Amino acid sequence: MRADSLPRFSPRAGCLALLSLFVVAAAGCKTERDADDPIILGVPPVDAYLGVEYAYNFGAFDSDDILDYSLTNAPSWLALEDTSNKARQGVIMRGVPGLTGGNRERDDLGTTENITLVANDGRASGSQSFEIEVQENVLSLAVEDFTEGEAAEVPEERDNRCEAPELGELGSHSYEANIYGDDGSVTGTEQRTRDTYPVLVRVLLDQPSVTRVAVAFELDSSFNPQRCDDGFDAPHQRCENGAANDNEAIIGKDIVGLGSGSEGALPVPSYLEYQPGDDGFLSKGVITLEPGITECYIRLEVIEDAEAEPLETLNMRLIEVRSGLAGLGSSNSGVRELLRIKDNEPSVRLETVAGGTRDAINVGQTREYRALISGERLGTYSVKLGEDDDSEAVLGEDFFIEVRNTEGQWDDGDILAFREGIEEVGFRIRVPATYTNGQLENDRAILLGLDERYQAGRENFAASADADKLRVNINELTSPLAAGTENGFVPTDTAIGHNGRLFVAGYRADDSNRPWVRIYSQKGNMTEQQLSVASVSVEAPPVIGFAEREVEEGGDNVTRYEFVVSFGSEQTAAGDPGGNGVDFHTLLYFFDTAQDPDSYVPVWETVVGTSGNDFPRWTGIDPDTGFVVNAGETSGQWPGESAAGGVDSFLQRIDTEKNGDLLTPKVAWTRQVGSARHDKSVVGGSAETSSPLLLGSSAGAVMGQLQKGGEDAFFYIASSKDSDITVNQRGTTGNETLADGIYGINNVWLVGNSDGDYRVDSDEGDRSLERSQLGSQAGFVLSYTVVGDVTRGFTFNDQDDASKEVLNAVITYEEDILVAGSTNGDFVDSAGNSLVQPIIARISLSEDSSDGEEDGDETDSSREWRKQVSVGSEDAGIVHLENYRDDEIIALVKVSGATSDRWEVRLFTGEGRSLH
């Protein structure tokens, strides 16, 4: 470092110039003293560095005398230059810590305080005190990630940099590699010679030294061929390439300082010296930085092998300063920098035929999938398929893989070969008819990827792509479930519960319309229980919600499974006449493992209502604190609330309180919102927003909002009995009659039916909902933020705009949206339908998809599709949807027979393929 005073003008001239502007300005150049006293100008920098020149040019001012200078309390390395020009007012202070003044080296480190420069004119003196801290001149390393098959770029030339080593040619390196048998045992070795690509590690010196600095370096890896996975002994593939050595680069096989055959193509610069490491490879050495150089380069060579490898790491270390004064880090204890080597082998991803990564397969079935390879390659590359460590199903026991043999026939096997020019190879998964998951309640899922343990260390095997593993759920429910009949159990709502249980709420027509719940396992086994002796009002059928949440019991956190059912009845909880219209019954149940067998038992039951009719339309449980939320319609007036019209919406919270050993319900608040018209289309709610949410539609102006058209959608949030409520009334000049609604993926999703075609237009960042007239009824999906900003709009119509489409249900699925209902025409092209048939469609919410363009070319068909399902010669439609852990779609289908209605539970994959 050369620390010079910033101004290079005469101190005397500076002060005289100031005096010429203002007489009293002399006080700005000196302190309160006699006008003839000498003044020293400037304060030197505090920081100095070992081996680096330190210099500072003091200024001085005296009106009429020649000055002499002296230093007191100065370190031995620091001195004043001889002043040959005595008329010059000022002096240069200079030195090199560690070298001048006795070559004290590191003994000069530290801070010297109260160093004083004195200027004397023979009659008076002036002084300036300061301090200097001598620090290490720190060496450090800087590096960018390396990639196999890529050389470093040549750095820009600068005066403070070494000349870059040769980087434009390839090197060569030979090494011995193990050959593995199918079981991973070492069956022999072979000599391999591979190209190498030169890369750079930058060696940085904080300040330019006045002497050469030579420092020793070495590559250091934690790889240990004797470290093996459990159950294996060296030498073995599961040692050198086992989990214990994952991500550890092998010096001499992955990277080397100088390749064994590189020196001709990659000459070694004069400032570098390579030396052999313990393994005999040139992996360490010495680098020398000439005086004034602060950046130099250690050239390494990344070996271009043909093995698929994860990201590999090792360290470059600076271990000893051989000459000069420099610090190995701020504490002079050493420098270490992580080196990362990325692989460049071709990679393979596994997909469904439609391009997805999730599927479901029935027991006893075989389905075809595909493997796709990408990346540059020469010759044939292979992959070995295998279950992932997190797979619940075991290859060779629960499922089998089939590959095509040379004759094109399917055989059991797990290795796929990609000949040059072939980018896609098919394979099949077979689940034997004898498969069962035993007593497990949840389905097992196959998580299929590449057997990277087998492939590790073997050449010409492709890597696993950075994509999801192929997940295939094994479904044991291979035929539709009979869920109810018009004259027996009538299903009215569904919820998915713990371990894949499907909860179906309804009432029994053959039991005086009393509410029941049926619970189906993933295998289709059913248990049912009566919920109340009160008869259900068929205008206010049961709705159900489920929650899985963590609670504290006895100081421990346990998982609690609960469901809540709400229904309307003109009877009391005991089944007696209520005499107050239809009241609101709510019952909470929890899963009690103390029962034999485990079962759901009641927690509490409450009946509330107004003087009018109160109909539940949605119920749910807050997943954090467990309070119950009800959304419904009332023709009365709740306490403390105002009735707006004939039928209003209401949102209610019920808390669970402890009363001794009992848990009892308490209505925390009920909020009533409506218009002067009937707001009788409450379709949903949510307990997963910041506060409870209600979704509905109205033919009036709700709570003073602007009415858009004939019937508008509206939604609002309530947080307490007296919180402000902001209603978001949204729609167009047409009718937006809702059938269902949810909150999911950070948006409100509204599903309904209309004779309009909907889209969202963006004009300079502002989004607006637009509608055009259709010739027939179609379904629509509208999405809003909770504060009312429109985000998406979709229309589901037949291509000819001739049939009637009805949407009844919406759910989220893998960050997408699923809708379902029915059509009396050809919702899918060329269906040739004359009945009412179920329809189901998936909307991709990826950035590539477009509003209203369900069949766009930019979205893969695994995430954007529409299906039409035949259930024989009877009319049918989907009335409810549930999502089983993003593995299967569960649909409650209403079938209208010739004499009566019945209900079935049917399953679909995430790509819309029926499993029944």
Image: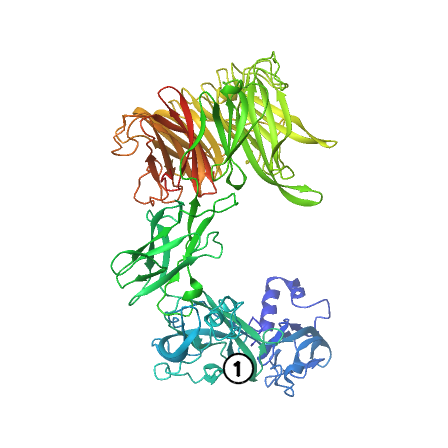
Q: Residue at x 65, y 77 (%)?
A: 64
| 218 shown above or below 421 | below
Identify the secondary structure beneath mark 1. Answer: strand
Task: Name the image quarter holding residue 851.
Answer: top left
- Quarter of the image with the C terminus is top left
Q: Residue at x 56, y 71 (%)?
A: 7
| 575 shown above or below 58 | above
- The answer to which of 902 and 308 lies nearer the viewer is 902
- The answer to which of 379 and 344 lies nearer the viewer is 379
For disc 1, the neighbor class at 10 Å (few under 14, some 14 to 19, many from 20) is some
Q: Residue at x 30, y 31 (%)?
A: 827
- Quarter of the image with the N terminus is bottom right
Q: How many marks?
A: 1
- The answer to which of 771 and 222 lies nearer the viewer is 222
- The answer to which of 601 and 690 lies nearer the viewer is 601
Outermost residue toward the right?
Answer: 660
Q: What is the x, y in percent for residue 68? A: 67, 82
Outermost residue toward the front?
Answer: 434
Left or right of 800 in this view: 250: right
Q: Is residue 905 visible?
A: yes
User: How is the structure coloured here?
Assistant: rainbow
Task: Name the image quarter holding residue 830.
Answer: top left
Outermost residue toward the top?
Answer: 579
Left or right of 807 in this view: 572: right
Write down the residue under mark 1: 216
Q: Amino acid at mark 1?
A: Ala
Q: What is the x, y in percent for residue 81? A: 61, 84
Q: What is the x, y in percent for residue 817? A: 42, 38
| 231 shown above or below 590 | below
Q: Is residue 165 visible?
A: no
Q: What is the x, y in percent for residue 272? A: 45, 83
Task: Name the image quarter holding residue 329.
Answer: bottom right
